[in-house]
Image (cartoon, rainbow, N blue to C red):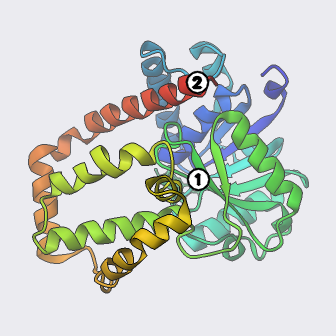
Amino acid sequence: ADKNSEQQVGIVGSGLIGHSFAMIYAASGYRVQIYDIKPEQVQHALSTIDEQLEHLAKNGLLRGKLTVKEQRSLITGTNDLAECVKDAFFIQECVYEDLDLKRGVHAKIDGLCKDDAIIASSASALIPSLISQNLKHKNRFIVCHPTNPPFYAPLVEVIPAPWTDPDVVVTTKQLLAETGQVPVIVKKEIDGFVLNRIQYSIIGECWRLYEEGVMSVEDIDKVMSEGLGRRYAFMGPLETAYLNADGMYNYGDKYREMIYRVQCTFGAPRKMEGPTLDKIQNELTSRIPLDQLNERRKWRDIRLASLQKLKNDLDKK
Ligand code: NAI
């Protein structure tokens, strides 16, 4: 970690994702500079980080080997983009999901960063070649799509553009793994990458089941949290299938007809609008009022952090 403190990470855009990445890199001992077009967002990010570090420490869930004070002292805010990126070996852009905005911000970073810096974007769906096609440093560009909240959900989808240098992929993977995040490589550019494609197929089916009166919102969510999700926190759907029979051939023999028959009833996608939207919103609001979302997010984050701790303990990390 001592050596890491000589290296700087630049965070451009310090909202939800930006402040969380700042905490992730600081927990591994890197110096972190956070920048935002709105100075008050930088201040807000710094105070959110203070609050979260204290909260984590109180619950015994602090990451890494450094104390709250040590981690906090590695993070500084700036209102100057040049200061944020000029010495950084790794830059994580976390501005709104808007192609023109991201292109503009990356054009500026491009003119300020070191030639060998890695420039990562947190884009959720914008493919890397679209964002980076006109950059001088486009060979140093990569998308690192985190899972919200990144500090508590370690998966990061790493998506190179066709022109991204191979060493950028390798170093990005190593850096993320070192911080405790879990990188996966998306080998081809595809709309929605992988996490959201899977997530949207789940949301789509939940929507349909509710709309057709098959189940309540609360019970649909339980199917995941008390059923599928219990296994999925430890192994994915493919290994789950593999273990649910004697291997994949056997699973196919036993279930392929049934799975195919049910899949054929899924139908076309539906838009999240109209009376179904009203009903789902109302059912959720009656249980979790809109003014209590932050409380509920804290409830969630402590459980996610505890699950991480459990997984680390089980795997003796
Ligand atoms: P956010 O709205 O919390 O933060 C965006 C920040 O960017 C704001 O503080 C804003 O002031 C700043 N900004 C706007 N223009 C800027 C500029 N020109 N220069 C510097 N800063 C600027 O948004 P959030 O949720 O943090 O999203 C950031 C990125 O991360 C987006 O691409 C989003 O799709 C992606 N992402 C978001 C996830 C989520 O669940 N929130 C999950 C995974 C990725």
Question: Dot 1: what SS?
Answer: loop
Question: Dot 2: what SS?
Answer: loop
Farthest right residue?
115
Side of 166 where 76 appears, left or right: left
Q: Is residue 177 above or below residue 141?
A: above
Mark linked to residue 63: 2
Residue at horizontal 33 percent and vertical 38 percent from the top: 297
Residue density around tag 2, few if under 14, some if 14–19, many if 20 or more, within 10 Å: many
Q: Is residue 216 above or below residue 290?
A: below
Residue holding disc 1 = 94
Residue density around tag 1, few if under 14, some if 14–19, many if 20 or more, within 10 Å: many
Closer to the camera in the image, 61 or 86 = 61
Q: Estimate the x, y position of residue 284 in percent, counting from the top left.
A: 15, 52
Q: Estimate the x, y position of residue 218 in percent, counting from the top left.
A: 16, 51
Residue at horizontal 85 percent and vertical 24 percent from the top: 3
Ligand 1 contact, mark 2 (Cβ < 8 Å): no
Please identify, in this view, whether the residue under mark 2 or under mark 1 is nearer the observer: 2
The type of residue carrying mark 2 is Arg
Side of 129 where 16 appears, left or right: left
Q: Is residue 274 above or below residue 149?
A: below
Mark linked to residue 287: none
How far is the residue under mark 2 from the one under mark 1? 22 Å
Closer to the camera in the image, 311 or 257 = 257
Residue 15 visible? The answer is: no
Closer to the camera in the image, 184 or 132 = 184
Ligand 1 contact, mark 1 (Cβ < 8 Å): yes
Closer to the camera in the image, 244 or 157 = 244
Report how many numbered discs are placed on residues in the image.
2
Q: Estimate the x, y position of residue 309 in percent, counting from the top left.
A: 50, 25
Residue at horizontal 82 percent and vertical 52 percent from the top: 170
The type of residue carrying mark 1 is Cys
In terms of image quadrants, where is residue 267?
A: bottom left
